Amino acid sequence: MNKMNGSQPELLIVMPVFNEQASVRKVVLEWFQEVDNWTEKFVFLAIDDGSRDRTLEMLQRLKETLGDRLEIISRENKGHGQTCLEGYRIACERGIQYVFQIDSDGQCDPQYFFRFWRAREENDVIYGHRVRRLDGWQRVMASIVLKTTLLLSSGVLCVDANVPYRLMNTNAIKSALKRIPEDFSLANVALAVLLRKDKRLKESSISIVFRERYGGEPKVRFGKFGQKAVELVWQLSKI
């Protein structure tokens, strides 16, 4: 089922995965179906971040059906942010022009993808702006706290710095990726800050609705957001 027939992909979809056996099959299949409507020249890269459930097994079974366009990397746990950056770097190393990230819990709705894809040539980076979140008021508050923290500590106003729904031109992010240390836990946020500070880049956002999770539990509990905010400010000060 490899429709690219050996040609160079133009899009790498990066999906970090950790203990998402309840959702991973549905997420992969719905995204394959949607993206295939707009380009056949894509690779879907699932990076298993040391899952302890049946996630990896389910991905391997999916590959038997979906073929070479589904790639799987399995490694020890390094955290969500660094897993995302590994996928971004792979896109850069392979010379794939666009990299698009989603999460594996089902909250990223494929119905918005076409808007991002149509706007790719006019923008270096396109973020999803979660104008509505169906995963609870605590997550809404966490996004507000993060946005305020970044404005006060780094002087940048990011629309949604931690959103997983983002399409990026790999040429635009190469230099910023090199500046993020391997021990930076909220690496996705660091990348958004560095890109925002680069006045040469053209950024835009597209409104999305963030769905409820298909299953499983959030990786970061609400009670730890304060601790994460302090850690983020300290790490950002070093880069």
Image (tube, rainbow, N blue to C red):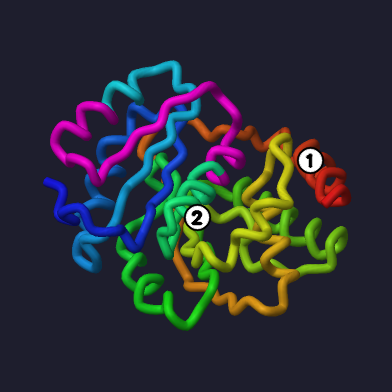
Q: Main secondary structure of the magenta part?
A: helix
Q: Within the magenta stretch, is there residue 7?
A: no
Q: Residue at x 55, y 76 (%)?
A: 204
Task: Using the rendered view, name the quadrant where residue 19 is placed.
Answer: top left
In the depicted structure, whether residue 206 falls above or below residue 63: below
Q: Is residue 169 left or right of residue 105?
A: right
Q: Residue at x 34, y 63 (%)?
A: 10
User: 31 or 135: which is nearer to us?
Assistant: 31
Numbered disc in front, either 2 or 1: 2
**How far apart are the two marked residues, 2 and 1, measured between alpha carbons?**
33 Å
Residue indicated by mark 1: 226
Amino acid under disc 2: Cys
Query: Looking at the rendered structure, which numbered label has been put on residue 72?
Result: none
> How many numbered callouts?
2
Amino acid under disc 1: Gly
Q: Is residue 57 left or right of residue 45?
A: left
Task: Using the rendered view, name the quadrant where residue 33 is placed.
Answer: bottom left
Q: Identify the secondary structure beneath mark 1.
A: helix
Q: Position of residue 9 (x, y in %)?
A: 30, 58
Mark 2 / mark 1, whichever is N-terminal: 2
In the depicted structure, whether residue 222 falls above or below residue 53: below
Span highlighted in magenta in the image: 59-85
Q: Position of residue 146 (x, y in %)?
A: 73, 54
Residue indicated by mark 2: 92
Q: Is residue 173 visible?
A: yes
Q: Residue at x 70, y 58 (%)?
A: 144
Q: Is residue 131 visible?
A: no
Q: Residue at x 72, y 72 (%)?
A: 198
- Find the residue positioned furthest to the bottom: 122
User: 214 or 186: which is nearer to us?
Assistant: 186
